[in-house]
Amino acid sequence: MQLAGQIAVVTGGAHGIGRALCRRFAAEGAASIVVADRNLAAAEQVAAEINGVAIECDVSQEASVQSLVNQTLAEYGRIDLFASNAGVTVKGGVEVPDPQWQWLWDVNLMAHVYAARAVLPSMIERGHGYLLQTSSAAGLLTEIGSAAYAVTKHAAVGLAEWLAVRYRKQGIRVSCLCPAGVVTDFLDLDDPVHQFLHMSAVTPEELMDNVIAGLASEKFLIVSHPEVEEFFQFKSTRYDDFLRNFSKVHDKIERARNQPSRPPRERDGV
Ligand SMILES: NC(=O)c1ccc[n+]([C@@H]2O[C@H](COP(=O)([O-])OP(=O)(O)OC[C@H]3O[C@@H](n4cnc5c(N)ncnc54)[C@H](O)[C@@H]3O)[C@@H](O)[C@H]2O)c1
C-alpha cells in the first residue's frame, strides 16, 4: 500500500508511535487521517498539525470503536487503512490483580477484535483494505517485566495472523508491527527492563521508515530492529535455548534492580 490519497485511522494517535504514524502518513500524502485517542486534547493537537480530524475513542470499549468507524465512514465514505495501535502495560507477573490483566486484555487484544469487527464489513464490500496492528517484540519473544503485556501482545500477534489468513482472498492485507524499544512515554526509565530496552531504542520517526517500507511491500511482520527477527528465528529453531537465554537476562536484570548503578549491558541480548 502507498499512503498517497488514502483515508487512515490511527488509534493511540495522540502520542508516541501513533503520533509518528499520523505525521508520516500525512507526509506520504494521505488524503485524511483520523487521530483517535482517549486523550482528545492531545489528539486535537496532532490533528491540527496534519490537517486531520481528532475523535475521542477508548479502544477498550467496543461501542467507542464502532462509533469511531461509523463517524469516519460517514465523513469520508471509506477507511483504507486502520492502524490499531493504542497499547498499555503494567509491571509484574501472575500476581498482578485481575482488573489490571483485564485492562491489558481489553486494550492490547480486544481493541483489535473490535476494530476488525467494525471496519472489515465496509472493506470487504469494497474488495480491499489494510489493517496495521501494533503488537510488540514482546508478542513474538516475551517481556521479562510484565506477564500480562507479554501474553496479551502474543494474543495480538495471533489475531493478526488469523486475520491475514482468513481475509486475504477478500482483498484485506494485514501487517503486524512488532517493535522492541522505541523512545516514547511508554518506556519507564525508572524500570530496569525498560532501561535495558531504552539502550538500543529507536525513535518513532526511525520506526516509520520500516512501517512505510512494510506497507509498500505488504509485509506481515514489521519490526524496529533486525535483532527482533533474529531472536524470533532463534526461538522457532532452538526454543529451549531461547528460554534459557531469556532466563539469564531476567537474572541479570533482577541483579541490576538490586544494584541500580549497574544496569544490564546491551550485549546481553534479549
Ligand atoms: N514504545 C515502545 O518501546 C514500544 C515497544 C513495543 C510496542 N509498543 C506498542 O506501541 C503502541 C504505542 O505505544 P507508544 O510507545 O506510542 O506509547 P505512548 O504511551 O507514547 O502512546 C500510547 C497512546 O495510546 C493512547 N491510549 C492508551 N490507552 C488507550 C485507550 N484505551 N483508548 C485510546 N487510546 C489509548 C494514549 O493516550 C497514548 O496517546 C502500543 O501498543 C505499545 O504496546 C511500544
Image (cartoon, rainbow, N blue to C red):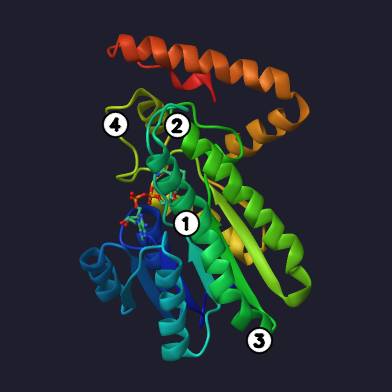
Residue 241, image x, y percentages: 69, 18
- Tell me if residue 12 comes above or below residue 239 in the rendering: below
What whole-number distance in Å separates the C-alpha atoms at marks 4 and 1?
23 Å
Name the amino acid type tagged 4.
Answer: Leu
Q: In the displayed structure, does residue 126 sit left or right of residue 270?
A: right
Query: Within 10 angstroms of label 1, few (less than 14), some, or many (20 or more) residues?
Result: some
User: Upstream in the sequence, badge 2 or badge 1?
Assistant: 2
Name the amino acid type tagged 2.
Answer: Ser
Q: Residue furthest front?
A: 98
| Residue located beneath label 2 in the image | 146
What whole-number distance in Å separates the C-alpha atoms at marks 4 and 3?
45 Å
Residue 185, image x, y percentages: 29, 45
Q: Residue at x 49, y 17 (%)?
A: 250
| Residue located beneath label 4 in the image | 189
User: Upstream in the sequence, badge 4 or badge 3?
Assistant: 3
What whole-number distance in Å separates the C-alpha atoms at marks 2 and 4?
15 Å
Name the amino acid type tagged 1.
Answer: Met
Camera-near label (4 vs 3) is: 3
Tell me, for residue 126, which label it has, or none. 3
Disc 4 and disc 1 in contact, CB within 8 angstroms: no
User: Upstream in the sequence, badge 2 or badge 3?
Assistant: 3
Name the amino acid type tagged 3.
Answer: Arg
What whole-number distance in Å separates the C-alpha atoms at marks 2 and 3?
40 Å
State the quadrant of the N terminus: bottom right
